[in-house]
């Protein structure tokens, strides 16, 4: 599922609310079930799922590690300073 833009998210939430209102108004149980299912799907699409967000975040972080935008290296090696006593005994 592709990420939903903010304006699209609000529209999907409005449509989900419309489905809920229609579900409350109908007396047919099959129609009510269909409308509630549609409202749930629209709401999920509007808010995205936690799994989808984690996947998007993981991909973003992986991309940043592979191609940092500021040109700085991702990792640097650190050297430890050796004491002079160790140098003299060798």
Image (spheres, rainbow, N blue to C red):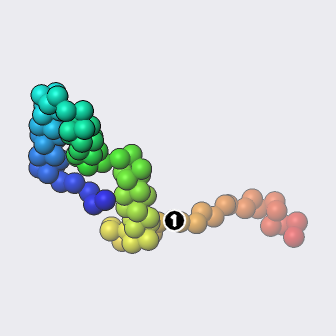
| Residue 61 place in picture, x, y as percent | 41, 60
For mark 1, what is the residue? Answer: 75
Up-down relation of residue 31 to residue 8 (above or below): above
The answer to whether residue 39 shows anywhere in this view is no
The quadrant in which the C terminus is found is bottom right
Q: Give me the residue at 32% from left, 68% from top.
A: 69
Query: 72 or 67: nearer the eye?
Result: 67
Count of numbered tags: 1
Q: Give me the residue at 26% from left, 49% from top.
A: 45
Q: Give me the residue at 16% from left, 46% from top.
A: 12
Up-down relation of residue 44 to residue 81 (above or below): above
| Residue 74 place in picture, x, y as percent | 46, 66
In this picture, residue 37 sits left or right of residue 18: right
| Residue 72 place in picture, x, y as percent | 40, 68
Q: Residue furthest right?
A: 89
Secondary structure under the numbered disc 1 in the rendered image: loop
Q: Give me the residue at 37% from left, 53% from top.
A: 52
The quadrant in which the N terminus is found is bottom left
| Residue 64 place in picture, x, y as percent | 39, 65
Query: 3 or 85: nearer the eye?
Result: 3
Up-down relation of residue 38 to residue 68 (above or below): above
Q: Residues within 10 Å of mark 1 (few under 14, many from 20)?
A: few
Query: 2 or 61: nearer the eye?
Result: 2
In this picture, residue 55 sits left or right of residue 86: left
The answer to whether residue 14 shows anywhere in this view is yes
In this picture, residue 79 sits left or right of residue 52: right
């Amino acid at each position: 599922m592709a990420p939903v833009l903010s304006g699209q998210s609000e529209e999907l939430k409005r449509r989900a609310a419309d489905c809920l209102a229609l579900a409350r108004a109908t007396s047919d149980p099959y129609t009510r079930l269909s409308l509630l299912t549609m409202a749930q799907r629209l709401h999920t699409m509007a808010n995205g799922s936690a799994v989808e967000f984690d996947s998007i975040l993981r991909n973003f972080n992986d991309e940043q590690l592979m191609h940092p935008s500021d040109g700085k290296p991702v990792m640097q090696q650190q050297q430890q300073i050796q004491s002079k006593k160790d140098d003299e005994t060798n």
